[in-house]
Image (tube, coloured by chain):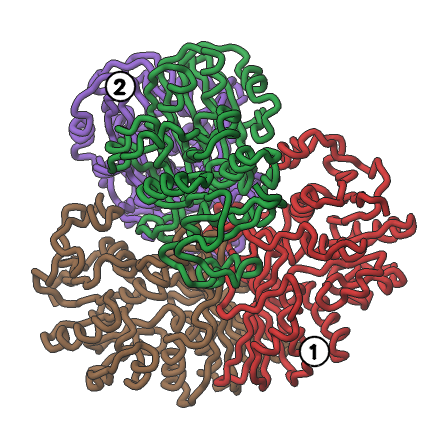
Chain colours: A purple, B red, C green, D brown
Amino acid sequence: MEQTLRVCIYGATGYTASELIRILVEHPYVRITDLVSSSTAGRKVSEVLPHLTPKLGDLVLSKEPEEDFDLAFLCLPHEVSLETVPELLSKGKKVVDLSGAYRIRNPKAYEEFYGFVHRYEDVLETAVYGLPEFFRESIKGAQLVANPGCYPTATLLALYPLIKEKVEFDSVIVHALSGVSGAGRGLRQQFHYPEMEENFFAYSVEKHRHTPEMEDVVKRLSGREMRIRFTPVVVPASRGMLSTLYVRTNIKDIEDLYRETYSGEPFITISRTPPMTKWVLGTNNCILYPTYDARSSTAIILSALDNLGKGASSQAVQNMNLMFGLEETLSLPTVPKFP
Amino acid sequence: MEQTLRVCIYGATGYTASELIRILVEHPYVRITDLVSSSTAGRKVSEVLPHLTPKLGDLVLSKEPEEDFDLAFLCLPHEVSLETVPELLSKGKKVVDLSGAYRIRNPKAYEEFYGFVHRYEDVLETAVYGLPEFFRESIKGAQLVANPGCYPTATLLALYPLIKEKVEFDSVIVHALSGVSGAGRGLRQQFHYPEMEENFFAYSVEKHRHTPEMEDVVKRLSGREMRIRFTPVVVPASRGMLSTLYVRTNIKDIEDLYRETYSGEPFITISRTPPMTKWVLGTNNCILYPTYDARSSTAIILSALDNLGKGASSQAVQNMNLMFGLEETLSLPTVPKFP
Amino acid sequence: MEQTLRVCIYGATGYTASELIRILVEHPYVRITDLVSSSTAGRKVSEVLPHLTPKLGDLVLSKEPEEDFDLAFLCLPHEVSLETVPELLSKGKKVVDLSGAYRIRNPKAYEEFYGFVHRYEDVLETAVYGLPEFFRESIKGAQLVANPGCYPTATLLALYPLIKEKVEFDSVIVHALSGVSGAGRGLRQQFHYPEMEENFFAYSVEKHRHTPEMEDVVKRLSGREMRIRFTPVVVPASRGMLSTLYVRTNIKDIEDLYRETYSGEPFITISRTPPMTKWVLGTNNCILYPTYDARSSTAIILSALDNLGKGASSQAVQNMNLMFGLEETLSLPTVPKFP
Amino acid sequence: MEQTLRVCIYGATGYTASELIRILVEHPYVRITDLVSSSTAGRKVSEVLPHLTPKLGDLVLSKEPEEDFDLAFLCLPHEVSLETVPELLSKGKKVVDLSGAYRIRNPKAYEEFYGFVHRYEDVLETAVYGLPEFFRESIKGAQLVANPGCYPTATLLALYPLIKEKVEFDSVIVHALSGVSGAGRGLRQQFHYPEMEENFFAYSVEKHRHTPEMEDVVKRLSGREMRIRFTPVVVPASRGMLSTLYVRTNIKDIEDLYRETYSGEPFITISRTPPMTKWVLGTNNCILYPTYDARSSTAIILSALDNLGKGASSQAVQNMNLMFGLEETLSLPTVPKFP
């Protein structure tokens, strides 16, 4: 790699790309070479993403990368990423894929949960799941990092200490709240401002594609098949995620366990009070609040992060830092805008 | 008319229709005969407007009215209303048109501001502008009422006492804020929840179709041509409107003037403090706060209403009450949901 | 009772009182005799509750009721209600108490969860829990109705069909979201607008006073002691409540069970899609969505209502209607403001 | 100065301090020595400002600075700053004062608009008004910088090109919208979340302390006394400011004038469309949209900034950079969080 890391962003007009750009323009060793967007190619950044005007206004979005690069971030739809990843790998590029196309090791899950047949099993096998707290060493050597989903990140970070400690449990309920940006930039009636304001509701109660992702990683970590009951809820906020786990088990000193497990982790905080999502907005932090309810023999773990931060784009940059031997925390925000 | 007033609503799936339905189901003398919607005909209310399920869930939307009716409320696009109004009038129906198609007496304005040629000048001449505080007697006898726009209602109610009192002035600046529902139910990127939340901005600064509407009514009331400088701003709220008028003039006892002018008006309140839009949400009230700034020789009048209430649907019901000889205030809410 | 029901509201400046007033001013048989408020007595409504100005602006709040009345609604702090209830009963008044002071039959619970000793066990025994769907007949004859808490209303309505059908289960997890008005009108840093906007968080995770209330009613209904694991979360909305229940059990045809149980209930709707809180704002409706997840052997029931509507004030009016032999649904809103 | 600039923050628990900290922890040459807070001294940052926990959680707030420093930022109430500034200056410290205590050169204005007698006229005379775009050279040499108010910053930047160009005009109307954080962290009923949500309203219509501040700077820049008619409005957003100026005048090519005036200014953008406040959140940018309405002979200039960014804390850091000979743009954010 050159002194400067050349980075290309595919799917540059969505929210995860927007957040990537915000972080990368402050990164001391990164230069963004191209913003690729099939739908808005040829237009200036100032027209398409006017909030970037003061910094990048005159840049023109491109249909294909016009300059060579070291790393591509893919902020593409799942089925587009599916095809783009092998192409880029075959050209020797490193890739951080923010879609779900290479997150689950079992290709069959894609038919049921994503609606397409996954024809790149060999590539799937090489993908490293980009949760540094679990797979740091593999990420360092990866050519392809599958950047985790927001719900899985919040949930797996909350569950991991129990798994690591081999705490006995057989049932996990995950009730998770998300701000609206988690659903992306595409327009939908229910996300029209007048209808989403002062409104909150569950969705995909029967089936959500983050369920097999979570179960797959749990299996990697514990060797066990486990069924996770997952209910997502959307609340009237732009960003933020709060996942609550209910785990029936017996455990003592749960706070100590969590503190030990994540001791030294720069982006994980164990809180003594239930975390507010406002504390993590725009940052790469995840705040955990573990507690045990003896009345119902239930460990309850709250997990807060920014769905576009640790849940997507800043985690992607953390992965980039690891892949290129940079200091892991470089350029990653830890202080939120408040209020 | 029968004992019961039979009412048909065209364009039944938008916000003004939704608010009309909320008011009309509580009206003691009204029966809704048909909810007409070209785009969703044949579907049940519970599918299209699920918030109405407990009351009207099994009703089916229709392509054309299936039952006879006495009055039609048109919640249609301007260019559709343009055609539907003469049709209905020719069948002897009474009409309250919530679009802008029959509000401005000068047909030429439609080419410039609405983008269509107005071919129904004769109908236009018979339309009564549905602001009861100014045109109550004409409304009582009208077959067609053109229900005013939200900005014109807020602004004209605020300006009227100065006109009536023949206060000298030559310049009016109107700076008006609106909740997002004023832009309707159609999806647009800027109104996607994550982008509209924590966001506010002016739009149509150069030219807005409510400007000629306001100027036309001012001319009817005062006999004078007057140029209104109008700037609309959208703020992150679902409903509510706050119009501020700056009128360069000399005047004393402005509060008294406003109190006298609107004495006895059931829906106009003169406030001693700047009104909050929250005080009028869901109601047919307009709250005015007139004050005079001697330093700058400027009368400043604040006017608050609900853009879907007095600015649209409840005012339409007020017009209906007048057209059919009912008590004017019947079924019209005056107490807002708070908070 | 007279032809007109004379109603006095104690604690008239909070949110539950405000919502009561909104409903009662439209009630055909009710006259509000006094708005009692120790803190603002002597002041006009227009100063204290300016949103009521157009309807009740000149009314003066009083320290004690100045006129005789048939029914008192108590919107007082728990420990004030505790004392006021016996006083009013001894004068022969009927009372609907919106505080928690008479909801739990076990007086000991008050020490642990409310921080006071309950010295009126005899009164407590006569109190009827004001959930009409369960205790309609008792409410009709009650002198004192303890109006349920918002979380218990949402949760118990969701749980009741399983209890009634004697479905076997031993564990209930309740994860419930509430708008901020549920915490009342008192100022707190976390509810300051800039901090609450774009923020959501759990609170009282260890212990909440609605837990013993729910468990007490479950015991009355089922004869069984049951431990409910309850986690409340506050989300950035003014009103609305969404309670999700996780019940480990085996059950078939859960939707049918819910439809049968609540068949004929005017305010309960069984929905085929997860309910949005926006569908119930300002109404007395509760919308239930029951589903069964065979993978995890868990019945999941979603329950949406307005915490100030069916969760407080409109339910209080429903109770009033029953207590005085009026039509149960009189004046109770079922169509929400939308959007 | 040392290699590292030692910075002390007084009044560390409010919003402007919170934003200062967010910026300064990323500044390569700054070290925060003390967070001074009279009300929370002795407590840990994690208790008082929990959103800072991951970065500064163990830091203890102090009653007085415990370490020597080069620069103090004062985020204190006006009347406290009034006294603290001369103290610090006499000890040879440099000061950026974010209060209003040293912004207006005429001490008499303080009695009328701030409610206190200003006894430090000599200090007042040495204060440099911290708007770099106007007073850059003076700021470089200043010991005391009076950091401008948010409304004056937005308004003066919008007005300056007309003054500089000596455009003739005699009347300026400023209608400005602000997010709620502009009112500070102190609790007030109207800013309680359930009341502020879905609410907007004007305040201080008769008299606001930013009016004399604006008029004073206009006089410095133009040599003319000018009366500004200023109306502030609060809207339901946490941050953001949109100021609209109406200037009656004749002018051509207004956009060119603005582009020329601010050519080379790193934080001023001239936009071809009305700016959205979301484009500036968390940044030091000000976006101007100048237009001319020939119909009403009125120049209309829209000005958007973040009231806590360019309107307060990031502008304070810009001033700091200038005062200490650092690159002016160092560490100042120009890309907003989006969405």
At 72% from the left edge and 32% from the top edge, which residue is drawn?
A: B59
- Name the residue tied to disc 1: B164
At 62% from the left edge and 70% from the top edge, which residue is drawn?
A: B158
C163 left or right of D118 in image? right
**Image quadrant occupied by the C terminus of chain C:** top right
Tell me where residue B265 sits by quadrant. Answer: bottom right
Distance between mark 2 and mark 1 Cα atoms: 74 Å
Residue A174 can be seen, yes or no: no
Q: Amino acid at mark 2?
A: Ser
- Name the residue tied to disc 2: A297
Q: Choose between B243 and A139: the one closer to the eye.
A: B243
At 87% from the left edge and 60% from the top edge, which residue is drawn?
A: B123
- Chain for disc number 2: A
Q: Position of residue C173 (x, y in %)?
A: 37, 23
Q: Choose between B201 and D45: the one closer to the eye.
A: D45
Q: Position of residue B174 (x, y in %)?
A: 60, 71
Q: Choose between B260 and D3: the one closer to the eye.
A: B260
The disc placed on residue A50 is none
Q: Amino acid at mark 1?
A: Lys
Q: Say which element carries label 1.
A: helix
B170 left or right of C69 in image? right
Q: Position of residue A228 (x, y in %)?
A: 38, 19
Residue B84 can be seen, yes or no: yes
Q: Is residue C52 above or below residue A289?
A: below
